[in-house]
Amino acid sequence: MRAQLARDAAAWGREWRPDWPAHILDRYRIDLSTEIMGVPVPHPIGKGSGQLSLRADQLEADADAGLAFAVLKTVIAEDERGEQAMSAWAIHESRMKVERRPSAGGREGWTVTWKGRGWDRPLEEYLTLVRAARDLAAAGRILGIPSVKYHLPPANEPFREAEYRFTTRALEEAWGPGPLLLEKDFSPTLAGDARSDERATILRWLTEVPARIRAAARGPVRLGIKLMNARFDDDFQREMLARAAGGADSLTVFNRLWDPGAGVAYGGWDLSDRNLRVLDGAPASVPRSGTGNIVSGRMIVAYALRGCSTVQLHTFFQLPLSAYTAPSGSRMARALHALVFDPADGLVAALLELEADGRLERRGGILHLRDLWRAA
Ligand SMILES: Cc1cc2nc3c(=O)[nH]c(=O)nc-3n(C[C@H](O)[C@H](O)[C@H](O)COP(=O)(O)O)c2cc1C
């Protein structure tokens, strides 16, 4: 199988196809199928919310490469008059810089430096994007999931329910029939904001926000909560996990770190070190979606072993083309190629290694990715 993998890495690097998971099942008897918020997807690799999911043509290119899902850029909630309590997050910034960032331990990683925040255009344009995503999902091409930043009050202030109601219902209408899939974002800029100074305030948000979103909706909602890396210790981070698990169907763990000196969010190895360390001490009571420095199939497995049924990448989909080994194909195809077929660190290699170590067993002759996250 190792020799086969080296041959496949070369062949698929020259010519990529979106039905690659079928090939993995056929050739290696590895079943990568999994689920996000209860919805089946053919494999675990998706795109995190951000600048790479602003437009329908980005989603179409992702579907062409065979990405499983994409979380749309985070929109800032508003009421029927267009008022946004969180308007400080709806600012425009287009310039991004992909750069090297060494971790505290000196390991070189990648980060994207960017001063922007949430969706900066009218809500109506976001609803058009949601409708385009819905049509792509209906055609079986890719699943698109909206993301919202709702009002988060400082201590002793009430939630602006009108913003919850108006935005959630507008999304439901654009989404159409069936339960609305929704991710609620707690971002690094929020972690760095004065309103996150108090632990009790953060815990109140995590307790109350899921219920407020469900109460605001007309129909059922499958809710993912994307947790920030708060500026407190690992124990508090685990307390946040436990609190959010009470009301969410899925937890996305954990958004980027906050650099107070530079005033920017960052990723790289510090981010994945912290995320994996926190998850290690916290058994999964609801399925998770891993995010943070996922740069290899080996890293997908690391998150899966900690209860992540899927993963959401951003930075790895933005690297210079020279960082991927495939000589041709779209950026997304080259990234997927590296994540899946790399003979040393790809997903196939990492799963075969777990099998060889006796940590993952075939059932009916097949290795199942879902056996990993379900056991966590
Ligand atoms: C430029 C940029 C913009 C982002 N915007 C959002 C956003 O609007 N909402 C959100 O939930 N996450 C946002 N993220 C976080 C990513 O979705 C992802 O969770 C995070 O970057 C960690 O993954 P990575 O290490 O693969 O980049 C953004 C990340 C980057 C780099």
Image (cartoon, rainbow, N blue to C red):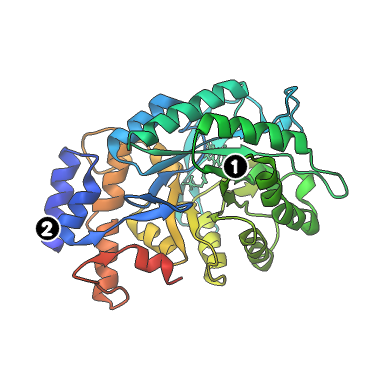
Residue 260: give its label. Answer: none
Which residue lies at the image location 13% right of the left edge and 63% below the top edge? 1
- Up-down relation of residue 243 to residue 186 (above or below): below
Closer to us: 267 or 145: 145
Which residue lies at the image location 22% right of the left edge and 46% below the top edge? 20
List x then y, in percent, for residue 351. 28, 65
Residue 133 horizontal side relative to residue 18, left or right: right
List x then y, in percent, for residue 324. 29, 42
List x then y, in percent, for residue 363. 24, 72
- Up-down relation of residue 93 to residue 14 (above or below): above
Which residue is situated farthest in the bottom direction here? 358
Query: Spatial distance from mark 1 to mark 2, Cα to Cα?
Result: 49 Å
List x then y, in percent, for residue 13. 19, 42
Residue 4: give its label. Answer: 2
Q: How many marks?
A: 2
For mark 2, does the 10 Å Cα neighbourhood hold few (<14), some (14 to 19), or many (20 or more) residues?
few
Q: Amino acid at mark 1?
A: Gly
Quadrant of residue 320 in the image? top left
Q: Amino acid at mark 2?
A: Gln
**Residue ID for mark 1:** 219
Residue 51 horizontal side relative to residue 2, left or right: right
State whether label 2 is within 8 Å of ligand 1. Answer: no
Which residue lies at the image location 14% right of the left edge and 50% below the top edge? 8
For mark 1, does the 10 Å Cα neighbourhood hold few (<14), some (14 to 19), or many (20 or more) residues?
few
Whether residue 44 appears in this view of the structure is: yes
Q: Which marked residue is nearer to the observer: mark 1 or mark 2? A: 1
Which element carries disc 1, helix, strand or loop? loop
Q: Earlier in the sequence, mark 1 or mark 2?
A: 2
- Up-down relation of residue 152 to residue 125 (above or below): below
Closer to us: 230 or 34: 34
Whether residue 76 appears in this view of the structure is: no
Which residue is situated farthest in the right direction here? 156
